[in-house]
Every structure is written in structure tokens, then in C-alpha cells.
């Protein structure tokens, strides 16, 4: 036991920098995996918690006012219902002069038992307190955040003469408010709803269905459509949509952390295994002596395993402690996710499982190398005195004949004259560089969203709408702005074939002024009945570019020819877009009730000219319209992923630590191998400086091969992974952006420079060794 302890102590003194790098890298890996798990919990568990606490509904059916929605409670698959509620679609504005939002008012005398809103601020409606002149309203938290509304604020609602006071804010498990896409939910007393003078097309009913088996969601929706009639249903939302909406971009951030955490774990395991193998080859005499004095093969194996498992345990403990102590202090969603994760039941055991998994994985990678140490014979075998590999190749002789510096020629030969060993070293160094390239690709793709949003489906920076300005007056106002181009648009909800869900049918731009969609497959829509679709819609309908698709709007069919696919970041890509002319032609051809005028644009998307500032344009339009025009900035997904940049830097730092640890192993192996050739190198006339150059160039060539292979594979993997994320999120492929060649060349140059610099001092020491010392390395 004392001998093992003394050997471990001497080993640590000899390899102190590499040991520190391995510990720090393991700590970084542990932090990455723990934060990834916390972000996944943050992305999904808040919705699950709200759904469980509120006894949420799996399906919400929105119908016309006269529909017998209550009959759906009799379906065999329905366990309980919330409602049906009488509803009114209205527009609310915060007073004085605040933000506006579209609301679905639900009239209810008491808080429902199923899908019960969970009050997070203020209180619920009270029939006595809120029945007077000052009427109360409870807002869903998503629309309250969008309007910056809080209990005590006053709202003005179109169609209701009296102001309404916000008395409470509640969390629900329904699809949240999104400006221009889905209205916010609000609750009022029945007599407040009855006071609205909204027309019949703005009135309706809403019922929530809680199912015995959530897997029956699509079947129940189909049965509901069959029972009520497709022309009576205006919208359908399910728990799957609400969950996906709640996950948002946190899931992408969690996937990124998890991917790099697992990749870094693999790189660290390879680095540790390579380090042990190299040290076994470099300490064959020491191991033989240990066996000669009585150490069994099992004791040698356990000694190596114990030492490197100690490194892993120390690194894992350091990473877990840092995450526990400082995780909640990280600004942004990472800190919020860590704080929330601590409140969940699985936090009591999941960090232990993750930490233990890291230790087991690294330990498994060290077993093979440690097993090789146990097989070293007690009597060392003499090695060949010519480690250089025998007769020089023709290429080597020609290079020397061309007066290429001998250090470079011999360094190249030294780096690759053992193909298997050289390939293993290149592969271990290439893994961190591959992951660094993927991180750079992620960063570059986010920069593309920010600097060139028109290339990723976001050509418009602002959207404008008004309930008071006429269509002609609004068009003239927007056309008077020299820094923008306005495209009229309208959106309706449509039922998909099979009537199991809803999609967004959008008319945007005109045939004379087509909207600049980012079409990545097929072509833009020009003729009548032509449309382009997002990836989410194509996946939902199992359709492809070139197919004809049928959808139902208010009971009337629309048949469109999909001629292209665009990058669509809204509504998980479940959007089919055509021109406003086509949408109007379908309405006048019979999709709208007889005698009704063609629909006016619901909004205008504003594409800014180069150099125009969105804030300045918004202020100018608001001032020119005397406050009658509502102008909003269109959200950019990159704004919600700002934490990815900091995460990428942290992950690159962890990968650099792993790369440095592997580089220390490579340098040590090169120096050891070349040390046995000192007699031969000096015999042929090489000076100590040239011998140093041989060792340095050998290390640089191995690193160059790893850097080129890692960056090349990283480019392919980065594009594939980012486009895969785009496809699964519904945005579609074509969003990936590769790093600039100059950045990749800089990464390669830095890797080779660091490798060469790190090997200079060990190489110089080896070159200055006396010939007698070198002869001892023959064993």
C-alpha cells in the first residue's frame, strides 16, 4: 500500500499540468450536463406543473356562438370538461396609451374545477365586488406579460363601454398569447360579457376536454368535428401544442448543452485513455520493477484505475459544487432554470446519477489501458535500437535531396511512421476540434439570424395594424414612409384534412408586389391557387413540394398547390402562405358567406430598407397616425437565444482544456519516442537545435492533421445538426451557416501554434540529454 501511494505521488509530480487539465475538463463536463438537465426541466416541467395543478384539459374546442359545444361531454373518451364558456373576441388596450392585444373573453361566474386558472397575482373574480360600475377582468399571464399589465391597471376593450380593472393574473396550461397568431385568454363575469356589443362573428363558445387517455387526442378532435360539424368549429388546440409552445427555445439551449456535454465527455474519456496508454508505454521499466518486487497484475491495474478515477471524482465533485453554489447566480434563463430545478422532486437524485455516470464513463475508458499495464512482463524486453523505422522512404530521400530542412523531413517521418499510433493520436485531438467547429457554426448561424434575418425567413422587422384607420388611409400612411416597404396580409385558422388540428393560412403580399419569402426548396408562389409552406406543415400533412393540399376555413374548402418550401419560424412552421390576392379570390369565389365583402388586410408587414432603425420607424409611424396605428417589432428567435453565445464560449473553454490535456500526452509521447533516437540523430550530424526542431515539427504535424480533420468533419456535422434542429422545430432546413474560412484557418493555426509552443521546452530538454542517458532508454 505504501509503495502504491509513493508511486502515485511520484506520478502526480511528474505529470502535474496534465492532471490539473483533466480535473478542470471533467469539472466543465459535469457543469455542462447538469445545466443541460436543468434547462430541459425548465423547458418542460413548468407546463407540466401548471397542467397538473390546474387539472388541465387536453383539447380546447372553439366554436361558433350557437353551437351545442356542451354535447362533447358525452363522448366516451372524455373524463371531464371545462365549460363550455360563452366567448367574445375583442381588442384590449392598457390605459393610458399602453400596449394592445387581442383577447378571447370567457364569461364564468366561478372558477372552473377542470382547467382551473392558477392565480399568480391578485385574486379571482368576485360577483359582489366586480359587479358594480368598475368591472373586473383576470388575464392569462402570457398576455399580461405582453401588455405589461398587473392587478390594478385599467383596460379599454372594444365593444364594451366601461373600463375594466385587472383584478388578477393567472397561469394556465393552454397555448399562450402570441401577437398576430393566437389571442390571449381573459375571464370576466357573465353580465360583463353580455354588455359587449360585438357582432355575431366575434362571439362563440369554448370548451376544454380532459381525456381519459391523452393518446386519444387526435381521435377525439375528429369525433368532435364530426359531431358539431366542420363549419361550426373555428379553432382547435391540444396539449401537445401547448407543451411545445411552453418549451420554446429553452429546449434548443438544453440540447446544445447536452450535445456538447456528451461530446466533451467522449473527448475527455479518449484523452484519459490515451494518457494512460502513453504513460504505460513510457514507464514499462517502472511497472516491471513493481511486478518484480511483488505487485500482482491486478494490483497494477487497480493502481492505475484508482489514480485516474481519483481525477474524475475530484473533477465531478468540483463541477457539482460549482453548479450548486453558483448556478442560480448566472444571469438569464440558465440561472432561472437552476433555481426551478432545485424545487423539483428529481433534483434530489438526478445530480447524483449524472455525476456517477460521468465517473463510470471515464472509468470505463481507462480500463483497457490499465489492463495493458497489468500485462507488462516483470522482465523488460529489449527494444529495437532503431526506432525510426528502418530504411528511409524514397519520398524522404528526395525531400532531403531538395534541401528541405532535415528537422521538417524527419519530423514528418517521426509523426506518421507508426500509422496506428499516429491515427489514434490524431483522432483524440480531432474530437475537441470537431466540437469547437460545431460551436462556431452555431454561433455563426445565430449571427445570421441577427445580421441577415431576410435569409432565415424574417424579412420584415415590423408589423402594423389599426382598428380605426381605413384601408386606403392606412395604405397611404405606410406608403409615405420612405424607409419601408409595406406588404398587406391576412391570416385565418384552417382545419387540416382529417380535421384533427388547425394550421395557419396566410395571405401576404400581392401578385404585383410579392412578399420576399425565404424560399429554400421549389419556387415562390405567383399564380392563382399557388402557395408555399413551412416544414412543420409539410410534416403534419405528410406532403411534399408539388402536392395539392386541402384545408377547411369556416366550413369552406381551400385547395392550394404547394410550389415551394420557405423557412418559417412562426407557429412551429405549420403555416401555408399565399398571396393576399389568392386569399381574396377564394373568398369571393364562395369561401366567404354570400354578399360579404372581400377581407381587408389584417396587418401590414414592414420590410425596412438598409440602414433604417426599427425603433425610429415605429416612433415615426406612431406619431404620424396620432397613436391610431399599432406598430410592433417582429420577434427574432435569435433574441431569445442570446444565452447560447455565452454557453458556446464556456463550452469552447472546456474543450480547449481537454485538447490541452491530450496535447500534453502527445508531446510526452513524441519526446519519449524521439529520446530513444538521440544516438542516431546525433550520429548523422544533427545539432541539438535541429533535434529540437524534429520533435517540435512532429508534434505540429500530428496537430495539423487533427485540426484539418476535426474542422472538416465539424463543418459537416455542424450543418447536419443545425438543419436537423431546424427540421424538428418546424422551421425547416437551410438555416445553417458555416463559419468563415478565415476563422477556421485561425483555429487551425492557433492549434498548431499552441502545440509547437508547448513542445519546445520538453524537446529542448530531451535534445540536451547526454548520450549515456539516452542509451538507458533502450529497455
Image (tube, rainbow, N blue to C red):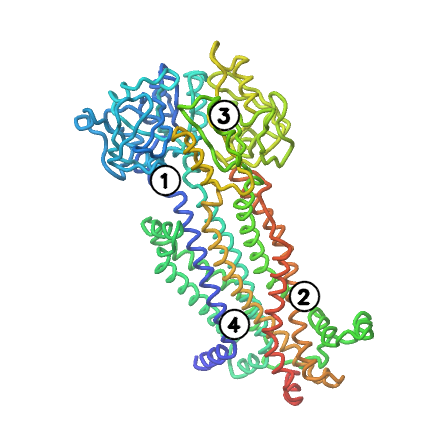
Residue on which the image places disc 3: 475
Query: Of the residues tagged 1 and 2, which is closer to the observer?
Result: 1
On the image, the x and y values in percent for residue 253 come to: 47, 48
Q: Is residue 636 above or below residue 313?
A: above
Q: How crowded is mark 1: few (under 14 residues within 10 Å), some or many (20 or more)?
A: some
Q: Are marks 3 and 4 in contact (CB under 8 Å)?
A: no
Q: Is mark 4 on a helix, strand or loop?
A: helix
Q: Do the residues labelled 4 and 1 touch (CB within 8 Å)?
A: no
> Label 4 vs label 2: CA separation?
23 Å
Answer with the quarter of the image where residue 696 lies.
bottom right
Q: How crowded is mark 4: few (under 14 residues within 10 Å), some or many (20 or more)?
A: many
Residue on which the image places disc 2: 420
> Label 3 vs label 4: CA separation?
68 Å
Q: What element carries label 3?
A: helix
On the image, the x and y values in percent for residue 530 come to: 61, 24
Q: Mark 4 or mark 2: name the one nearer the start of the chain.
A: 4
Q: Mark 3 or mark 4: name the one nearer the start of the chain.
A: 4
In-image side of 514 versus 242 (left or right)? right
> Label 3 vs label 2: CA separation?
71 Å
In-image side of 450 versus 48 (left or right)? right
Residue on which the image places disc 1: 48
On the image, the x and y values in percent for residue 87 come to: 33, 22
Can residue 650 be seen here? The reply is yes
Identify the mark at residue 18; answer none if there is no mark. Answer: 4
Amino acid at each position: 500500500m505504501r509503495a502504491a501511494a509513493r508511486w502515485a505521488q511520484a506520478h502526480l509530480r511528474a505529470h502535474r499540468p496534465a492532471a490539473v487539465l483533466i480535473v478542470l475538463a471533467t469539472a466543465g463536463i459535469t457543469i455542462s450536463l447538469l445545466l443541460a438537465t436543468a434547462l430541459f426541466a425548465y423547458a418542460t416541467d413548468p407546463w407540466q406543473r401548471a397542467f397538473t395543478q390546474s387539472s388541465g384539459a387536453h383539447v380546447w374546442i372553439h366554436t361558433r356562438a350557437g353551437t351545442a359545444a356542451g354535447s362533447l361531454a358525452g363522448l366516451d373518451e372524455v373524463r371531464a370538461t371545462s365549460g363550455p364558456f360563452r366567448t367574445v373576441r375583442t381588442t384590449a388596450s392598457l390605459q393610458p396609451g399602453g400596449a394592445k392585444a387581442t383577447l378571447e373573453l370567457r364569461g364564468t361566474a366561478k372558477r372552473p374545477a377542470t382547467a382551473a386558472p392558477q392565480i399568480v397575482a391578485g385574486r379571482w373574480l368576485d360577483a359582489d365586488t366586480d359587479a358594480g360600475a368598475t368591472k373586473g377582468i383576470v388575464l392569462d399571464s402570457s398576455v399580461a406579460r405582453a401588455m405589461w399589465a398587473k392587478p390594478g391597471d385599467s383596460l379599454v376593450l372594444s365593444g364594451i363601454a366601461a373600463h375594466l380593472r385587472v383584478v388578477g393574473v393567472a397561469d394556465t396550461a393552454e397555448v399562450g398569447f402570441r401577437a398576430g397568431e393566437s389571442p390571449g385568454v381573459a375571464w370576466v363575469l357573465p353580465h360583463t360579457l353580455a354588455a359587449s356589443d360585438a357582432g355575431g362573428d366575434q362571439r362563440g363558445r369554448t370548451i376544454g376536454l380532459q381525456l381519459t387517455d391523452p393518446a386519444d387526442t387526435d381521435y377525439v378532435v375528429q369525433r368532435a368535428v364530426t359531431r358539431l360539424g366542420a363549419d361550426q368549429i373555428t379553432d382547435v388546440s391540444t396539449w401537445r401544442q401547448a407543451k411545445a409552445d411552453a418549451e420554446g427555445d429553452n429546449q434548443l439551449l438544453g440540447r446544445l448543452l447536452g450535445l456538447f456535454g456528451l461530446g466533451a465527455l467522449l473527448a475527455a474519456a479518449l484523452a484519459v485513455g490515451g494518457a494512460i496508454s502513453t504513460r504505460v508505454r513510457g514507464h514499462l521499466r517502472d511497472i516491471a520493477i513493481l511486478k518484480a518486487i511483488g505487485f500482482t497484475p491486478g494490483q497494477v491495474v487497480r493502481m492505475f484505475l484508482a489514480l485516474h478515477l481519483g481525477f474524475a471524482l475530484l473533477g465531478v465533485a468540483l463541477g457539482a459544487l460549482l453548479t450548486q453554489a453558483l448556478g442560480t447566480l448566472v444571469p438569464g434563463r440558465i440561472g432561472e432554470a437552476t433555481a426551478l430545478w432545485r424545487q423539483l422532486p428529481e433534483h434530489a437524485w438526478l445530480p447524483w446519477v449524472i455525476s456517477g455516470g460521468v465517473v463510470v464513463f471515464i472509468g470505463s475508458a481507462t480500463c483497457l489501458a490499465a489492463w495493458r499495464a497489468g500485462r507488462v512482463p516483470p522482465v523488460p524486453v529489449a527494444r529495437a535500437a532503431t526506432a525510426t523505422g528502418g530504411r528511409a522512404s524514397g519520398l524522404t530521400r528526395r525531400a532531403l535531396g531538395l534541401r528541405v530542412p532535415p528537422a521538417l523531413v524527419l519530423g514528418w517521418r517521426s509523426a506518421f511512421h507508426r500509422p496506428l499510433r499516429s491515427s489514434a493520436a490524431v483522432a483524440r485531438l480531432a474530437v475537441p476540434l470537431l466540437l469547437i467547429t460545431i460551436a462556431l457554426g452555431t454561433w455563426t448561424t445565430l449571427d445570421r439570424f441577427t445580421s441577415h434575418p431576410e435569409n432565415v425567413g424574417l424579412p420584415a422587422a415590423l408589423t402594423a395594424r389599426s382598428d380605426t384607420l381605413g384601408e386606403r388611409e392606412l395604405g397611404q400612411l405606410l406608403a409615405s414612409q420612405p424607409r419601408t416597404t409595406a406588404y398587406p396580409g391576412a391570416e385565418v385558422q384552417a382545419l387540416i384534412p382529417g380535421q384533427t388540428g388547425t394550421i395557419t393560412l396566410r395571405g401576404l403580399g400581392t401578385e404585383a408586389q410579392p412578399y420576399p419569402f425565404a424560399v429554400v426548396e421549389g419556387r415562390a408562389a405567383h399564380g392563382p391557387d399557388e402557395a408555399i409552406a413551412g416544414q412543420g406543415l409539410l410534416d403534419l400533412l405528410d406532403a411534399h413540394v408539388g402536392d395539392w393540399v386541402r384545408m377547411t376555413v369556416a366550413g369552406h374548402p381551400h385547395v392550394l398547390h404547394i410550389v415551394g418550401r420557405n423557412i418559417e419560424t412562426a407557429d412551429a412552421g405549420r403555416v401555408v402562405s399565399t398571396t393576399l390576392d389568392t386569399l381574396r379570390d377564394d373568398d369571393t369565389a364562395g369561401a366567404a358567406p354570400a354578399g360579404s365583402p372581400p377581407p381587408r388586410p389584417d396587418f401590414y408587414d414592414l420590410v425596412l430598407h438598409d440602414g433604417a432603425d426599427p425603433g425610429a420607424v415605429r416612433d415615426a409611424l406612431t406619431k404620424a397616425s396620432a397613436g391610431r396605428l399599432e406598430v410592433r417589432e417582429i420577434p427574432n428567435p435569435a433574441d431569445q437565444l442570446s444565452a447560447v453565445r455565452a454557453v458556446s464560449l464556456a463550452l469552447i473553454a472546456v474543450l480547449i482544456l481537454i485538447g490541452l490535456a491530450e496535447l500534453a500526452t502527445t508531446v510526452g509521447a513524441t519526446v519519449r519516442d524521439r529520446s530513444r533516437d538521440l544516438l542516431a540523430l546525433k550520429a548523422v550530424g544533427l545539432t541539438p537545435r535541429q533535434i529540437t526542431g524534429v520533435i517540435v515539427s512532429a508534434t505540429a504535424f500530428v496537430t495539423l492533421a487533427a485540426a484539418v480533420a476535426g474542422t472538416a468533419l465539424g463543418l459537416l456535422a455542424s450543418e447536419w445538426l443545425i438543419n436537423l434542429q431546424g427540421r424538428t422545430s418546424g422551421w425547416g432546413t437551410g438555416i445553417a451557416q458555416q463559419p468563415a474560412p478565415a476563422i477556421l484557418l485561425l483555429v487551425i493555426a492557433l492549434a498548431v501554434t499552441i502545440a509547437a509552443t508547448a513542445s519546445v521546452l520538453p524537446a529542448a530538454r530531451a535534445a540536451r540529454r547526454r548520450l549515456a542517458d539516452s542509451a538507458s532508454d533502450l529497455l
